[in-house]
Amino acid sequence: MKKMDTLFIGFMLFSMFFGAGNLIFPPFLGAESGNSYWPAMAGFILTGVGLPFAVLIAVSMVQGGAQTIGNRVHPVFSTIFMVVIYLSIGPFLAIPRNANVAFEMGVKPFLHQSTNVSVALFIFTVVFFALVFVISLNPNKMEKYMGRWITPALLLAMVVLCAAGFLKLDAPLQAPTEAYQAGAFSKGFLEGYNTMDALAALAFGIVILTAIQQRGIKERKQLTSYTLKAGLIAGALLALVYVSLGLIGGKMAGEGSFTNGTEILTAASTMLLGQSGVTLLGFIFTLACFTTVVGLTTACGQYFSNLIPRASYKMVVLAVTLIGFTLSNLGLAQILKVSVPFLVTAYPLTIVLIVLTFFNRYFKNSRIVYGSTILFTGVFAAISGLQTFGLNLGPVQAFKEVLPFASVGLEWIVPAVAGAAIGLSLSQFGKSAAQTEQSA
């Protein structure tokens, strides 16, 4: 495969990952973390870049991808887990979130005060999802559309915005807010969940592998090698953008009180470039959200058309766009309300599955190890998700809060390790019993 093909596939992967959350969260982290910025950003990059990269590599290493990894726990678990992941990062959460953010940043600032916002949102989403549907129908051309055309335009717009920020913003970083005064790294680590990129990587793996295979690459080691190269390109670009946006947020902290990253970027672009800055920012958000929605729609189309033989790729893409269109018109606040509890539950399971995949050779694909580890992790991840949703679980919640790392939101780590240890012990005991029976 040519080097330029690898570069453009890396660009395509970057554009698929780089959506609403990738723009919103880094500047707010910068403003909140202040002079604790670098450890906080290091934690953010670990889960926002490093973990998705690890997921992609793990998926490329295994014949059958993410579905096969889940099968190592149990086929039923695998199907349920992957369906929930695809529906969540697809039509029921990430797709409508991106469409809403594209409207909020790309259209709403230019509306007249007398404009009916609901009607404007409806018209915007009709056009937005019609274009998503058309491009998603041709997954073979995604690398051409997104890697060669859209991503360079997006990167150029980002360079203009960030360069203006570095040249004109010279305020020192402020003192960190209370959330970042202790454990800035772990706080940034958890904030990286909000990009949803590790979950998206489970879905995008099939799209990237398909793009590489279309260039005649079939051997597993070569697939992993080219996925690694494309992932490094996308990861380096993501990390660079995160650091740049985070620094802009940190330097904007003294300019006022902000409640989210969109407010910071809107204020910064207006201060730096006037009305042209607002237009530029709207262009960035619209392109970023559009490419992510196309990537997610394509991934859902490929997965569900393989899972359900009677459902054609075109039929699935149509269903995904229609559901995304419908939910987008409910508004951003309702969508975001559901996202955090889901992420708190899903991310630990994803992290554990990927870690087990990399260490698979040491316990020889033992289903007992996979099952025990996922069970222990899942119980405490679910408790955290329910708690985040606002439920008081009484003594169960109190027990969770005394676990190590609970103060930084990582209480699932010790149960995961305990589950792995129990699984390893049971698998070794089973082997010893089998050997004893054979010798007898």
Image (cartoon, rainbow, N blue to C red):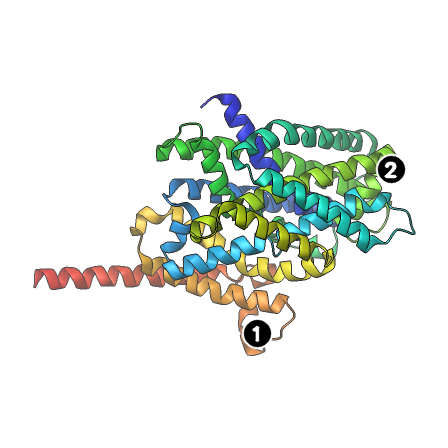
169 relative to 428 in the view: left or right:
right
440 relative to 151 in the view: left or right:
left
Classify mark 1: helix, strand or loop.
helix
The foreground one among 175 and 44 is 44
The foreground one among 193 and 286 is 286
Q: Is residue 393 above or below residue 265?
A: below
Q: Quadrant of the C terminus?
A: bottom left
Classify mark 2: helix, strand or loop.
helix
Write down the residue under mark 1. 398
| Residue that protrudes farthest toward the left in the picture | 440
Residue drawn 51% across and 66% down? 380
Q: What's the distance in space between the residues labelled 2 and 1, CA to CA?
A: 47 Å
Residue drawn 53% across and 66% down? 382
Q: Position of residue 94 (x, y in %)?
A: 62, 51
| Residue that protrudes farthest toward the bottom in the picture | 394
Q: Position of residue 22 (x, y in %)?
A: 66, 44
Q: Is residue 175 above or below residue 213?
A: below
Q: Position of residue 409 (x, y in %)?
A: 59, 60
Dot 1 amino acid type: Ala
Q: Quadrant of the N terminus?
A: top left
Task: Name the quadrant containing residue 156.
Answer: top right
Residue drawn 49% across and 56% down? 83
Between circles 2 and 1, the one closer to the viewer is 2
Q: Which mark is residue 271?
A: 2
Residue drawn 65% across and 70% down? 390
The foreground one among 278 and 160 is 278
Label 1: few (<14), some (14–19) or many (≥20) C-alpha neighbours in 10 Å: few
Q: Earlier in the sequence, mark 2 or mark 1?
A: 2
Q: Is residue 176 above or below residue 166?
A: below
Dot 2 amino acid type: Met
Q: Position of residue 284 (x, y in %)?
A: 73, 37
